[in-house]
């Protein structure tokens, strides 16, 4: 695929990597990439079929993977997810908090409370819960570890028609910065990826609901195209690798130049 290097950062052999929202899109691409790089991958998602399929792809390629059904908006699910990761693999080295939703395509004043609670529940509370239990585990291990939160350019700039989604991603950026500062002396790095539009099933659903949205969105990116899921996966792998050992509290814009103008 365009823009995707076949070479992956080294150093993931035997590392335990947890990826949420890994049944499709960015999450699946990231889980597969870590699997190819030798990591022991935990695939987390609410979709049983999709999650098992991702895990099977990793195993079929010679990697190791465990699927765990998890709704990141539920504390019990997330705590159990981390517990299962540790009981199965013995530790947790890296976590990619990717699970997110965007079913919003309306002006702010036309949204409703249920929509707000649904989006914030997954995108914000879900990331907070994941970080909470991941940080507790990494601290119990004696420190060290990397967390990457998948935010969005909507966490850096306004998102007309997607105000709640944008607010949730701005909050993820805030959580990332605070956690990075709090846990830096424990050797735990926390960063976020602020991606532009990525060719995923979620983006396709947005375009179905908004006439002309695809053309407008593509025009916003100076590179004139959308990202492939694998390009976001590559960024996540770099942030988890020793190549970024002095990077924490950073919001990496992988956006085809969108925020440059």
Image (cartoon, rainbow, N blue to C red):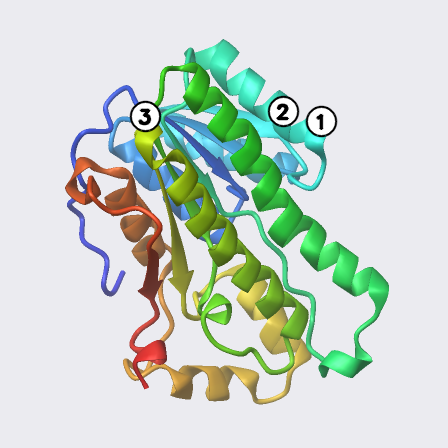
Q: Which dot, 1 or 3, sits closer to the camera? A: 3
Q: What residue is at 47 percent from the left and 82 percent from the top?
A: 217
Q: Nearer the viewer, residue 114 or 33?
A: 114
Residue 5: horizontal and vertical position, in percent? 18, 53
Whether 65 is drawn above or below 105: the answer is: above
Q: What residue is at 39 percent from the left and 43 percent from the top?
A: 180
Residue 89: horizontal and vertical position, in percent? 42, 13
Tell me the number on the disc at residue 76: 1
Per the image, the residue denoted by label 2 is 79
Element at label 1: helix
Tell me how far mark 1 sits from mark 2, CA to CA: 5 Å
Element at label 3: loop
User: Can you say which quadrant of the picture contains the N terminus?
Assistant: bottom left
Element at label 2: helix
User: Can you say which quadrant of the picture contains the C terminus?
Assistant: bottom left
Q: Nearer the viewer, residue 143 or 109?
A: 143
Q: Nearer the viewer, residue 100 or 75?
A: 75
Q: Earlier in the sequence, mark 2 or mark 3?
A: 2
Q: In the figure, residue 187 lies in which quadrant?
A: top left
Quick one: label 3, few (<14), some, or many (20+) residues within 10 Å? some
Q: What residue is at 26 percent from the left and 26 percent from the top?
A: 38
Tell me how far mark 2 sits from mark 3, CA to CA: 19 Å
Residue 236: horizontal and vertical position, in percent? 33, 47
Q: Nearer the viewer, residue 61 or 7?
A: 7
Residue 54: horizontal and vertical position, in percent? 48, 37
Per the image, the residue denoted by label 3 is 144
Quick one: label 2, few (<14), some, or many (20+) residues within 10 Å? some
**In the figure, is residue 127 to the left or right of 18?**
right
């Amino acid at each position: 695929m365009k823009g995707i290097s076949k070479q992956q950062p080294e150093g993931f052999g035997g590392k335990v990597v947890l990826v949420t929202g890994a049944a499709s899109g960015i999450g699946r691409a990231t889980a597969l990439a870590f699997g190819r790089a030798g990591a022991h991958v935990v695939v987390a998602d609410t979709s049983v079929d999709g999650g098992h399929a991702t895990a099977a792809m990793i195993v079929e390629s010679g990697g190791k993977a465990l699927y765990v059904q998890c709704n990141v908006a539920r504390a019990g699910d997330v705590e159990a997810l981390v517990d299962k990761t540790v009981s199965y693999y013995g530790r947790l080295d890296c976590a990619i908090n990717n699970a997110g939703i965007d079913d919003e395509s309306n002006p702010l004043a036309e949204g409703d409370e249920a929509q707000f609670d649904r989006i914030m529940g997954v995108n914000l509370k879900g990331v907070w819960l994941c970080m909470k239990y991941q940080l507790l585990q990494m601290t119990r291990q004696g420190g060290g570890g990397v967390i990457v939160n998948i935010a969005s350019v909507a966490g850096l700039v306004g998102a007309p028609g997607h105000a709640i989604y944008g607010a949730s991603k701005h909050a993820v950026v805030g959580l990332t910065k605070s956690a990075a500062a709090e846990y830096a002396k424990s050797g735990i790095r926390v960063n976020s990826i602020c991606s532009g539009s990525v060719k995923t099933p979620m983006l396709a659903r947005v375009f179905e609901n908004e006439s002309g949205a695809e053309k407008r969105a593509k025009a916003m990116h100076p590179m004139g195209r959308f990202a492939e899921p694998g390009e976001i996966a590559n960024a996540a792998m770099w942030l988890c690798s020793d190549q970024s050992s002095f990077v924490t509290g950073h919001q990496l814009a992988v956006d085809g130049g969108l925020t440059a103008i």
